[in-house]
Image (cartoon, helix red, strand yellow):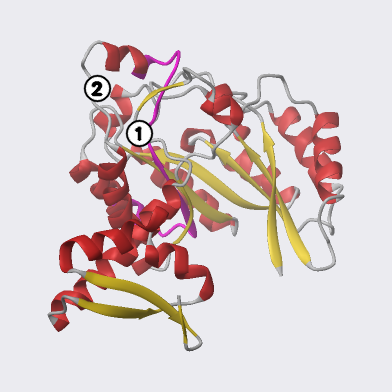
Amino acid sequence: MRKYNIPIFIPHRGCPHDCAFCNQRKITGVDTDITPKVVENQISEFLKTIDTENSTAEIAFFGGSFTGLELETQEAFLKVAGMFFPNVSGIRLSTRPDYINDDVIALLKKYNVTTVELGVQSSDDLVLQLNSRGHTFDDVIRASKLIKDSGIALGHQMMLGMYGSNPQKDMKTVDDIIALAPACVRIYPVVILKDTALEDLYNDGKYIPYSIMDAAELAKDVLCAFENKGIDVIRIGLHSSDELESDGNIISGPYHQAFGELVESLVFREKIEAEIKSRRLCNCELLYPCSKNQVSKVIGHKKMNKDYFKSKYNIELKCFNKGEAK
């Protein structure tokens, strides 16, 4: 059965902070206030496009800090979302870790919210301070416990390459998130957007972003670390949008439309290279078993793995599925 998210973007609503990297309107492509009626219309129109008999859909409030809204406003949105049960399977939302308390949890439980994703970003308090996050990692620990104790599924969102961070600090964040055992995680490499404090730091030479390949190599290690602990990685890299990709909106940084596939290609490259080294292969053809939906990742984004093994080992990499080489 196919699963869908019905994304409802509420850019920057509920959040008084201007984090160094943040320009939600550029990220989401939404630049207007969202009302409950607009939400109702968006959900209705989305449901018309899918086969609800053979799929499930989850309403997802993203783009702002949902639980930072007034409780009455939160309830108005949640009430609209609740109108669509049982045609939707659940409600998920993203928010800040310092905007979770007992009253908020009670409201979310009342309207059958299924998942809350916290914007963790980093477990290093100095990095959080340098990026004007306005919360500490202790807030993440406290909020994560409240969410899990309530029976709502916990999600975490983290960023790679924040101002003041480095690969070692990023991997420490991974370890700290694993210790809190969320059900799912999103991984976002920091991209410098127009009209942000990070743009100023970059222009002043105080911030150097990761390159695309450095970010992808690091994200590969992060992905493997989470998956090895049974934590579902549901997103790697920013969602592409016309607004985000308009001329001048992305100043610099590791933005790539297929960043997730790039990272997964590197995961397979590492596995295949380990096999090549263990078997001391070179100057040959290597048939690698994989499922049909893994072929592009094994061969690599734009055949990057195929070219890599040909250049380095003179090995012709091919995939086979059900006895057929590709």
Q: Nearer the viewer, residue 26 or 93?
A: 26
Q: Is residue 315 left or right of residue 264?
A: left
What crowding class fits label 1: few (fewer than 14 Cα within 10 Å), some (14-19), or many (20 or more)? some
Residue hosting label 1: 136
Residue at 29 percent of width and 46 percent of height: 173
In this picture, which residue range is highlighted in magenta? 176-198
The amino acid type found where label 1 is placed reads Thr
Q: At which x and y percent is residue 69?
A: 65, 27
Other residues around mark 2 within 10 Å, as few (<14) / some (14–19) / many (≥20): some
Which residue was labeled with disc 2?
207
Q: Is residue 168 left or right of residue 143?
A: left
Q: Is residue 149 left or right of residue 40?
A: left
Which quarter of the picture shows residue 57?
bottom right
Residue 64 appears in view:
no
Residue at 39% across, 52% down:
262
Which residue is found at the position 17% from the left and 68% from the top?
313
Please, what secondary structure does the residue beneath circle 1 have?
loop
Vertical order, 31 against 126 (above or below): above
Determine whether the residue tagged by mark 2 lies in a helix, strand or loop: loop
Give the CA separation, mark 1 to mark 2.
Answer: 22 Å
Image coordinates of residue 319 in percent, x first then y, are: 41, 76
Q: Amino acid at mark 2?
A: Tyr
